[in-house]
Image (spheres, rainbow, N blue to C red):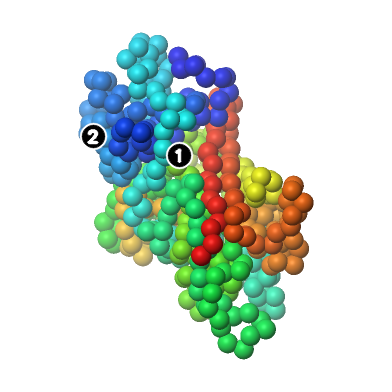
Amino acid sequence: MTWIDMPAGHPFGVTNLPYGVFSTADSAPRVGVRIGDFVLDASAVAALGGDPGDGPALAPAWAQPNLNDFLAMGRDVWTIAREWLIDVVTNDAHAEAVRPHLIPINEVTMHLPIAVADYVDFYASEHHATNVGKLFRPDSEPLTPNWKHLPIGYHGRSGTVVVSGTDITRPSGQRKPPTEPTPVFGPSVRLDIEAELGFIVGGATELGSPVSVADSDDHLFGVVLLNDWSARDLQAWEYVPLGPFLGKSFATTIAPWVITTEALRAARVPLPGQTDPTPLPYLQGEPTDDGASTAYGLDITYEVEWNGTVISRPPYRSMYWSPAQMIAHMTVNGATLRDGDLFGSGTISGPEKDERGSFLELSWGGQEPVRLDDGSERTFLEDGDTVVLRATAPGSNGSTISLGECTGTIRGS
């Protein structure tokens, strides 16, 4: 229960409390916490004198225009801060002092929640990888021989990560139409989305110090909805032999609200199964005190909306590789983690057609147009199209928590 005026069962209730960065018409960007239809000005409330714990003061970290200083404080401080915030919004003794620092959600502007350090995009859905393999390599096995041995990924461009609501300019580059003997240059004509989950990292590591699957939770601060926009025609021409480049680097959109891994603890589920083959020891999870595993999946259900029509509901729980395994593989060679690192899960797709998380799959390479509620048909994105990703997950005490929205509209090049 909370003293804040909000409906029972609100998806941004006490069991959620995500972090973001907001500003108002007369104030600079700073860290806020969403509760119901309000944003709690975290630094202002921490400065009232109730700053939690004996460790670093949170008010200065939360007064920053991104979460990076807070991310650097590590798991113990994140846990203390969440416990304190729950007390702030549930204990009536705080109501009078805190109420002036609750700002209606419609009076704030949301910003990119982190200064993105490094960005890595993985390829963790077996269903997506199989579909793409069938489309791109019809005469070969859909999955490459390495796919079930390691979480495949590539390094992206952190400077083009943008917050939800930012318009996306149609990218240009080289593409080779099947009817042309040589490549041509121009705007992408097969512009796509990838519905993903983004993971935000804190607790920087030193060069040469891998992070194990068991220790990964010390660095996994939270998750965001992520749309990794993709120019499939640019990608198809450039990706052999080194992989994605211009077809991916032009824009990646993330939602403004970071849902903490602690809020998602009730959403943890076993992975679908990794027995044929069994991963190498450094990728294997270890049993936890509650009988689960340090390599876990998440029960998160998405919906993908295209110009107002929900065309897909990808289930994250079907993903093959876990976020803990992604961190372990990403650092096993001694690569560092930095505060504000972001890594994406790769496209989330389930086994059914209406669970596919990209338009490449939904239209089967452009051969099967998707019909929208207004009667129009689409294979790939047209100028003016708007895509919205939404997702929910089970929270503690039988609640449902929201991951918010991740929105982008395509503009001509």
- Residue found at x 40% / y 11%: 92
Q: Nearer the viewer, residue 373 or 398?
A: 373
Q: Secondary structure at mark 1?
A: loop
* Residue 257 numbered tag: 1
Above or below residue 163? Residue 8 is above
Find residue 113 and report its horizontal and vertical position in percent.
38, 43
- Image quadrant where residue 369 sits: bottom right
Callout 2 amino acid = Pro
Q: Which residue is mark 2?
A: 60
Residue 111 seen from this side: yes
- Residue found at x 65% / y 75%: 137
* Residue 79 numbered tag: none
Q: Secondary structure at mark 2?
A: helix
- Residue found at x 46% / y 17%: 4
First of labels 2, 1 by sequence position:
2
Callout 1 amino acid = Trp
Left or right: 131 with respect to 287? right
Q: Nearer the viewer, residue 38 or 276?
A: 38
- Residue found at x 58% / y 41%: 391
- Image quadrant where residue 56 sits: top left
Q: Please rate how many residues cluster around mark 2, counting C-alpha atoms within 10 Å: few if below 14, some from 14 to 19, many from 20.
A: some
Residue 80 seen from this side: no
Q: Please rate how many residues cluster around mark 1, counting C-alpha atoms within 10 Å: few if below 14, some from 14 to 19, many from 20.
A: many
Q: Total of numbered circles in the picture? A: 2
Q: Residue furthest bottom?
A: 181
Find residue 340 and report its horizontal and vertical position in percent.
34, 49
Find residue 349 and report its horizontal and vertical position in percent.
64, 54
Above or below residue 91? Residue 154 is below
Above or below residue 276? Residue 107 is above
